[in-house]
Amino acid sequence: METAQLDHARTALKKYFGYDNFRPGQEEIIQGVYDKRDTLVLMPTGGGKSMCFQIPAITMEGMAVVVSPLISLMKDQVEGLLANGIAAAFLNSSQTLNEQTTIENKIYHGEIKLLYVSPEKMLSPNFLPILRQGNVNLFAIDEAHCISSWGHDFRPEYTQMKFLKKTFPDIPVIALTATADKITRRDITTQLGLENPHVFISSFDRPNLSLTVSPGQKRYEQIVQFVRKRRNTSGIIYCLSRKGCESLARKLSGAGYHADYYHAGMTSRERNDVQTDFINDKIPIVCATIAFGMGIDKSNVRWVIHYNMPKNLEGYYQEIGRAGRDGAPADTLLFYSYSDVMTLRDIIERNVSEQESIQLAKLERMQQYAEALICRRKILLNYFSENLGDNCGNCDICKNPPALFDGTIIAQKALSAVARAKERIGVNLLIDILRGSRRREVLERGYDKIKTYGAGADISSRDWQYLIQQIINIGLLEIAYDQHHVLRLTDEAQRVLFGKQKIQLARMAEVKERREKGKRDVHKEKKRNRVKNDLFKVLRQLRKDLARKKGIPPYIVFSDASLQEMAAELPVTEVDFRAISGVGDVKMEQYGPIFMRAIARYQAEQGGGKNTKATLDEKSEGMIQLLKRGLPIVEIAMRHGLTPEEVSSRLAALYANGADVELKRLISKTELKQILELMENLPDPIRRKDVVAALDGRMGPEKVDYAMAYIERNG
Ligand code: ADP
Ligand code: ZN
């Protein structure tokens, strides 16, 4: 019984969504729902929570009702479901009465499998009859943390959702969230009145997100370098202030990058426009405050940059989590500077609140993460009480483990300067002293007289910044946050100062060198991936055109992950195309032929490329040979699983590019002559479709391709 149900679920996964396997946990959760168990699902953003109620909804009798707090998110999900041929709809206050009635009628006729509603709608009295008559099989509460006043998006209406279990004790409830802390979890269970729920906590690891932290100097230059390598991909740059968002967007636009901004100071209309354009791949870069990205489901955000450091690791993880939801590689970059830490500290301290000490401690964890010299993912997952066995291999530290050197003397210079300045200086003044600066403050306070003045002039101030951060990080210096952030020596510092203990530091030069090597490696890989990337670009453009025609976001047509797989696998037959992840029945039917044609065309162009006779791909070579053996086009097409049109257009392209295609087998001398004469009488520029029209059915259109190929090759 159980396995039959799960077989059914797996078939639906492939048929509707085009995926071959469930992700860890999904199957178990779905089985629980089939067994009518209440369920609590904790999964990171992009983990695949929706599937846990969508598959049961599709495969069970009746309709599932999904409560979702954000109208934009609702619309997005319904659009995605419809594009996969699933009967979904939403009801909320943004609709006219008429629209609502239409949907209600469909519900009464059992024509809806998934109904999304806002919490307000769910609670409204006129909705109850619909619930009673709509043959509901499951309630799903999305973003369930909104129920907890402890959580960060508290929504009072959510707390009344208890009536569901009271009114419909036999219908299972599945609550889903990406916020994992214990208090929120308990709140969800009790407030919804879940009975002995099946609690599922998935790993919070997101291995496809690369993690990089970079020093906060020259941020703009670093950003330009970063986005230059990622032209036309979608990304978000989070900034602390509204002004920061605006000025960065302007600067990038001025430099020829298409960027816009988004923050709470704009009208909701303006914000909506930016968000829509971002979703539709019309604006690739958005500089935004942290609210941006919360209500959208866009799966192909390829990168996230934090211009400023977030306040805590929860926020950071949630924000970078908006990248790479499709599971394809995505990059994250965090700028870290000491002055950002100070700014955040001041903000926390100014907003006197009971939680101040918690917030400060969280900030400190964030800072430790940014300064770390061990695998960053380990630190992150540790923070979420999860243990990552091995190093991740996809963070800057893993990719370039720092080489350490004996930093005892350097540390002694710094520590001694702090001691001689009577622990009254902060980081910047310390660097000034070490470098022998003539700045007024240094001279006025007599620091040019102390023994270590100028003792570190051979190290740049940027490198000193980096070294002192490490010295703080390994616990030799402490920052007295309550005393204007002056530096204090720890007990351990005394031992280093008096030569009783040696210490290890990572050198800035190392970092630079390693970065160079990284660049060289990237170069090699780039070459290998060129073909793949070029085709990916072609497919991406095709996706964009199709999406525009249909008025849906591009990622609803296909995810980046699907396009990348197509570019690598080059599927040109239905069987191969169906094997691509994300290709279900409806997508196969609607887009399969179009995309396969684009891939075949691309291959044909590449295969016969100007100077690449030697690199003809196997398929093209095979076709040329079959042609030589005298096989008709229809036969060649069958053997290659292509349409005759695809074969003839590829052969024409191959011939035009100098490949050894026997043209006489494709078009007779008389036919060629006729077409050439016809073309002479047509006005320039000669277009294929004009020639085809002029032929008026006397010959097939493929003959025009051959003739045009003849001209292209022979002039
Ligand atoms: P969440 O709601 O947890 O943030 P989603 O449900 O939006 O995540 O899923 C994120 C992405 O992963 C979507 O593009 C979804 O189609 C995809 N996905 C979900 N389940 C699977 C699966 N079993 N195999 C492949 N992709 C999946
Ligand atoms: Zn790592």
Image: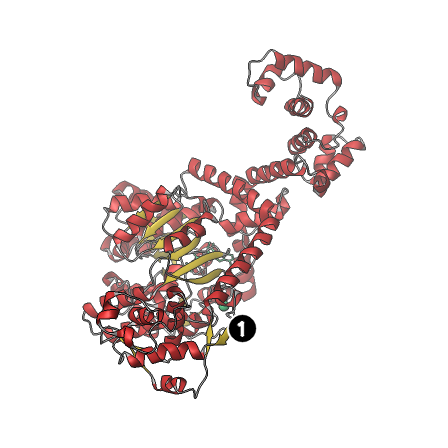
- The residue under the point 32% across, 82% down is 489
State the quadrant of the C terminus: top right
Q: From the viewer's perspective, tell me whether residue 3 is left or right of residue 501.
A: right
- Point out residue 229 in the picture as x, y percentages from the top left corner: 48, 49
Q: From the viewer's perspective, tell me whether residue 236 is left or right of residue 166.
A: right
Mark 1: few/some/many CA within 10 Å (<14, 14-19, 20+): few
- The residue under the point 30% across, 45% down is 272
Tell me if residue 425 can be seen: yes
- Point out residue 38 in the picture as x, y percentages from the top left corner: 39, 68
- The residue under the point 42% across, 59% down is 333
- Point out residue 113 in the picture as x, y percentages from the top left corner: 42, 51
Tell me if residue 579 can be seen: no
Looking at the rendered structure, the secondary structure element under dot 1 is loop
Q: By what rule are the colours in the image chosen?
A: secondary structure
Q: From the viewer's perspective, tell me whether residue 464 is left or right of residue 543.
A: left
- 285 and 158: which one is in front? 285
Q: Is residue 653 above or below residue 297?
A: above
Q: What is the quadrant of residue 662 in the picture?
A: top right
- 60 and 557: which one is in front? 557
